[in-house]
Image (cartoon, rainbow, N blue to C red):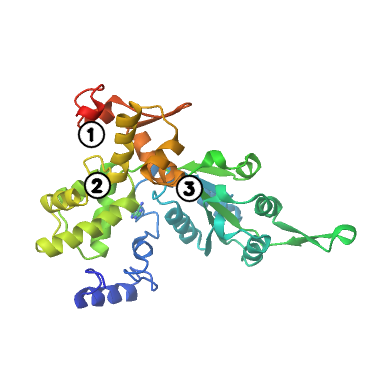
Amino acid sequence: MSIISDDNDFIEKTENRKRENVLPQSCDFDRNFENCIRPKSFDTYIGQTALKETLKISIAAAQKRELPLDHLLFYGPPGLGKTTLAGVIAEQMGVSIKITSAPALERPRDIIGILMSLQGGEILFIDEIHRLNKIAEEILYPAMEDFFLDMTTGKSQTVKTLRLEIPKFTLIGATTKAGELSGPLRDRFGIIHRLEFYSEEELSQVIKRTAGILDIEITDDGSHAIARRSRGTPRIANRLVKRVSDYALVKHDGKITRDIAEKSLDILKIDHYGLDSTDRTLLKLIIEKYDGGPVGVETIAAAIGEDVRTIEDVCEPYLLQAGLLQRTPRGRKVSPETYRHLGYKNLQQGLFQ
Ligand code: ADE
């Protein structure tokens, strides 16, 4: 049992909040922490300000026309709130949402089943949509364009095509790799938006909101200390709040101050840039074994024992944006700032820091 939920006071408060509809009825902090703290409305969704404004206009226009919202594609690094935003849109439109991901739609019957189960106006959210296979994509095209399912029955000579009308729906696709989406699929989305990394101030607000829901006391500079090391990513910030809160409870009086946050994050080996030991191992490898690069991502993956997808999807987006890593046609290389950040005295020193 976790420190957070193994507390009678907290359990009682959680039940009260469910009664007041502040928390979803299904909220179970130990099992689905992320679902409990997901904002449900544009007012409680922090950050992505410009995106929220354009979405509100698209939603209002769709409502005035009494039509479903155009199909939407969200892209950007993981953990920035793509699924959460889809939930907020559903709430704002007053419709329900079905959530799935491309790897769960492996067989034609998976995608057909979910499309046939949709109600009019409903939102279908497909995460990691760049991983959809060709057959599933081709089933999706007429569904997205004309709200039809083209199905074939029988074999070779006796094959028949059946057009089946389905209710009008909105597809929200999410991807960390917009470049891997096929052209025809991308073209069928009417609205395409990129989610941006969060500022320190925005993350600090996310942290304070989460601490409020979890009934954790936190000071302003405590939330900023966590925000600074959260790599611009709310999912990481929320995870760190829990870890720091455990430390605060065990080592102190439960309150998160700047000092407590910094000590706890130091123990977790999360540095001032928010880098963890995997990030540092990756960067040090490029410096010490490959003279700062360039070196191919497959070589890096094999050397540090991580898979290429984890490196590309999880580690790299933030390292690239922080200017600590560069992508070149010949592979990855580090920047002078990487040497400085990791404590190398000059660029030639590599091994002899
Ligand atoms: N938790 C995760 N993402 C969030 C966001 N954008 N606003 C508020 N809380 C969040």
Ligand 1 lies in quarter: bottom left
Residue under label 1: 342
The spot of residue 57 in percent (x, y) is 49, 47
Is residue 66 rendered to the left or right of residue 54? right
**Mark 3 or mark 2: whose residue is earlier in sequence:** 3
The image shows residue 229, relative to residue 242, as above or below, that is above
Residue under label 3: 55
SS category of the residue bearing label 1: loop
Residue at screen point 68% across, 53% down: 135
Q: Are dots 3 and 2 in contact, CB under 8 Å?
A: no
Residue at screen point 19% across, 31% down: 343
Residue under label 2: 227
Q: Quadrant of the C terminus?
A: top left
The image shows residue 126, relative to residue 76, as above or below, that is below
Identity of the amino acid at label 1?
Answer: Leu
Identity of the amino acid at label 2?
Answer: Ala
**Mark 1 or mark 2: whose residue is earlier in sequence:** 2
**Mark 3 or mark 1: whose residue is earlier in sequence:** 3
Q: Are dots 1 and 2 in contact, CB under 8 Å?
A: no
Q: Nearer the viewer, mark 1 or mark 2?
A: 1
SS category of the residue bearing label 3: helix
Q: Are dots 3 and 1 in contact, CB under 8 Å?
A: no
Crowdedness of circle 3 by 10 Å Cα count: few (<14), some, many (20+)? some
Q: CA distance from mark 3 to mark 1?
A: 41 Å
Is residue 4 rendered to the left or right of residue 119? left
